[in-house]
Image: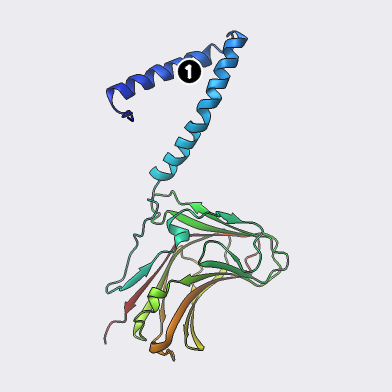
Amino acid sequence: MAINPDGTIGQFLHKRTLTRWLDAASNASDAELATLRAQRQQARQLRSPLQELTHIADIRLALPRIGSNTFARPAGTDWAWRPQQWRGALSERGIAPVRNKDRLGHDMTVFHDCPVGEIAISQIRNTRDDDLAAYGINLEVFSFTGNFVSLVLDVPKGVCEGLRKQHLIQLAVTLDRESPVKAFARLNVKHGPNTETVLETLPDDQTETVVEFDLGHSQLNEKRVGQMWIDLMFENPYMNRITLRDLNICRFPRAEL
């Protein structure tokens, strides 16, 4: 049976154990070598589970909560999504160097046209008080002789169900740039053999950015919508660190005029 660390017995055992090791540490300079050798072995045995406990506790207790799907949604939102890269820990936390078409998670692909490829991408833990997403994506570019780096997100097919031309697709991004860099977001919707695209520019001077993709003037065939993906493109990101602290997508109907 597990002992409650805040209970009377738990507090008593903790104080007794802590006192023992404080005494051992303060007397280590004068202890017999046989005693010191035994204490070292015991300390090493304790270190591994204590480090593991501390590591897990730091992750679980840090803000924001892992798995959180909390973010602002426009009125009338009928579909919303925060990708796994920003919600929970990935099995592969980073790639370096990043080759063209490498994937981080099952729904994010990195494209670039740099032959040198001194690019690294990693998932980081968000711990700031104003962070809503549990994790962020850190993109670091060093020597770069290409023109662009693009992060392509495959949007779940649920967004395509019932998609109409009167829908707006909103992309909200929290973006930190170490140095100024031009950034663009492009919505791609495949319907039958054709693909509709809508391109928007992300403001250079804003950390929190919201763009809306309007399909109202497109040639979208509503009956044949089958796939959607979003490109985040960074133009000539030489010697730059770009951190995407949050990213989420919403679908909602355009207000009737």
Residue furthest to the front: 1
Image spot of residue 1 (x, y percent): 32, 30
Q: Residue at x 50, y 67 (%)?
A: 107
Q: How is the image coloured?
A: rainbow
Image spot of residue 237 (x, y percent): 62, 66
Is residue 199 or residue 105 the one in the foreground?
105
Mark 1 nearby-residue class (10 Å; few <14, some 14–19, many ≥20): few
Relative to 49, 36 lies left or right: right
Q: Residue at x 30, y 73 (%)?
A: 77
Please identify the quarter of the rendering in which residue 86 is found.
bottom left
Question: Would you place residue 193 above or below residue 158 in this image?
Answer: below
**Amino acid found under the numbered disc labelled 1:** Trp
Q: Which residue is mark 1?
A: 21
Question: Would you place residue 66 above or below residue 197 in this image?
Answer: above
Q: Residue at x 48, y 37 (%)?
A: 52
Relative to 26, 6 lies left or right: left
In this figure, what is the number of numbered marks? 1
Image spot of residue 182 (x, y percent): 56, 71
Q: Residue at x 44, y 81 (%)?
A: 226
- Quarter of the image for the C terminus: give it: bottom left
Question: Would you place residue 25 above or below residue 159 in this image?
Answer: above
Disc 1 on helix, strand or loop? helix
Image spot of residue 104 (x, y percent): 55, 61
